Amino acid sequence: MRVHVLGAAICCALSLSAVATAADLSADAAVSRAQSLLGNHAAALANRATADAFVARDSIVDADGSEHARFDRTYQGLPVIGGDVVVHSRRGVMRQLSQSMDTSVRPSIVPGIDADTAVRAAGAQFDLAPDAAPRASLALYARQGAPRLVYEVIYSGIKPDQTPTEMHYIV
């Protein structure tokens, strides 16, 4: 009897593994099709600049076969905050593209201030004792109006109630 229970458990585990693998392959295929669409006629719809690249974040395949692939956008290697795109398709045919960017114009990526200045500006807003050195990195900020070059400064600390906090400042 123990052999049958163990055998059934192994069969069940293997079948669940096969389902997970099939779902992963379906999601990978959905991402691949969406990337192809972004490289073709959807490029204009996505307000894609020449130096834009799209990095797959996740995808969902509905029961009816509709695919929704989400991409983070980068420009010349810098992340574009607010530049993400969702490609909605079915059987490789574009149905819709969701995004919040409304221009393909991109700013210069030469900063007007240095990272230390950005860290000091953000630090003036962070009212906790940092528990690690702040991090500053260049990014494009595209959530309000035309994209602009910014530093994203990240501070972390512990609130008085012992809640860990990570604050992101756009400078």
Image: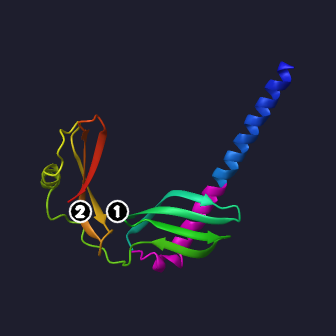
Q: Which residues are magenta?
A: 26-49
Q: Is residue 39 visible?
A: no
Residue 59 percent coordinates (x, y): 57, 58
Q: Is residue 15 above or below residue 71?
A: above
Q: Residue furthest toward the front?
A: 161
Residue ID at (27%, 49%):
167
The front one of 32 and 19 is 19
- Secondary structure at badge 1 equals strand
Q: Is residue 28 above or below residue 40?
A: above
Give the labeled residue for mark 2: 150
Q: Residue furthest toward the top?
A: 2
Give the labeled residue for mark 1: 81
Residue ID at (63%, 51%):
24
* Residue 116: numbered disc: none
Q: Residues within 10 Å of mark 1 (few under 14, many from 20)?
A: some
61 left or right, relative to 138 = right
Q: Main secondary structure of the magenta part?
A: helix
Q: Is residue 29 magenta?
A: yes
115 left or right, relative to 100 = left
The front one of 132 and 105 is 132
- Secondary structure at badge 2 equals strand
